[in-house]
Amino acid sequence: MNMNGMEYFNTSKVSDRITREDLPLVIGEIENENKFEVGVAKKWYKSHKEEVCAIVDIVKEKKLSLSNPDVTQFDLAVMDSVYTLAVSGIMRFTPEDVARIMSGNLEQNLTPKKIKEVKESIEKLSFIRLTIDYTDEMIARGEVKPGKRTFELESYMVPVRKIEIKSRNNQTKLTGYQLLEMPILYQYAEKTHQIAGVPLEILNTPSIGDTNDVIVIKRALIRRIEAIKNSRNSIVSESIIYERVDHTTGQITGFFAKLGFFESDSSNKKQWNKKRAALHKTVISILDDFKKKGYIAGYELVREGEHATAKINGVKIITN
């Protein structure tokens, strides 16, 4: 593959909301049945700030027969990688190409299981339609005056058709896809300047492995770090909190829940503590690798109390 050495990430609040696994969306089969708003910006109105929202509608085709049609963090990784290929001018690709971009290693050996997971994600996303009305956001950004025009995008999340592609050695034919247009989430992110890019080598962490857990954690950390580094963002904290209680709903939220790691999925507290410790170890291993590569300056542990033995509940990123 003729790549430019970069991996691109959709950092928009719309992509974040669609893929949050602690707040799953209802994806129906009827347009406009489950429209929802996503707060994307703040604007001053006289003496107070007012939230600016994008209006989003997401529907699935009836032929999508998966038991779980939710758009997940893994799906977002797939979409980021398809977009990265497209930006490099590669509109025809295989699931293997996408999986290698996800890992940051273009020569990575892939398991049949990984290839199957990526293939299923691409085909699922090709049957889910998304509409984004971001007119108010463009007005708030000063891109257009009120009443002049509307800004709305509508298409499939990964608009592809299935094709056959020759293998690298030209000996066999592989199942592949042709991207018919830029994925809608990325058209939106480009127009609203919400695309981040990092060198592929930042994602290549062979000493840590490349399980699905590692993939989603690594990419979520990069999104957060890019947000912290972006001077245009009003980030009030460089801390990533693993678990917290949403005082409005009483639900457990935070970094782990957002990525789909829930205590309720464990059979007991002991099992969850073991899983939680493993997730924390993965976070630290990734951050150590980022520090070694100079992507971050370092990090600090965030504890629930001031005592040195208090429970660890996150990390604080140090970027300079």
Image (cartoon, rainbow, N blue to C red):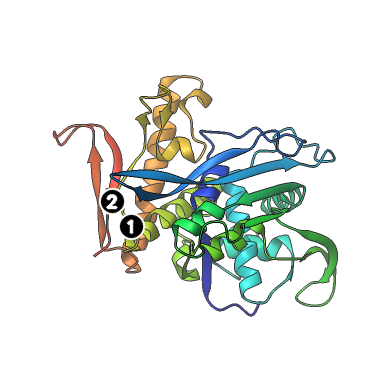
Depth check: 97 or 135 in front? 135
Name the residue at 62% across, 63% down.
187
Q: Position of residue 184 (x, y in %)?
A: 65, 58
Find the residue positioned furthest to the top: 268
Depth check: 191 or 216 in front? 191
Which residue is the site of mark 2?
A: 238
Asked if 277 appears above or below 12 in the picture, the reply is above
Q: Which mark is residue 107?
A: none
Which residue is the site of mark 1?
A: 228
Name the residue at 39% across, 60% down.
226
Residue flagged by tag 1: what amino acid is it? Ile
Depth check: 258 or 149 in front? 149
Q: Is residue 171 visible from the viewing direction of this image?
A: yes
Depth check: 318 or 16 in front? 16
Q: Residues within 10 Å of mark 2 (few under 14, many from 20)?
A: some
Q: What element carries label 1?
A: helix
For the N terminus, give its image quadrant. Answer: bottom right
Name the residue at 31% across, 52% down.
235
For the C terminus, give its image quadrant. Answer: bottom left
Asked if 185 appears above or below 45 in the picture, the reply is below
**C-alpha gap between disc 1 and disc 2:** 7 Å
Q: Where is residue 278 in the image (x, y as percent from the top left)?
A: 41, 39
Residue flagged by tag 2: what amino acid is it? Glu
Q: Say which label, 1 or 2, has the lower sequence index.
A: 1
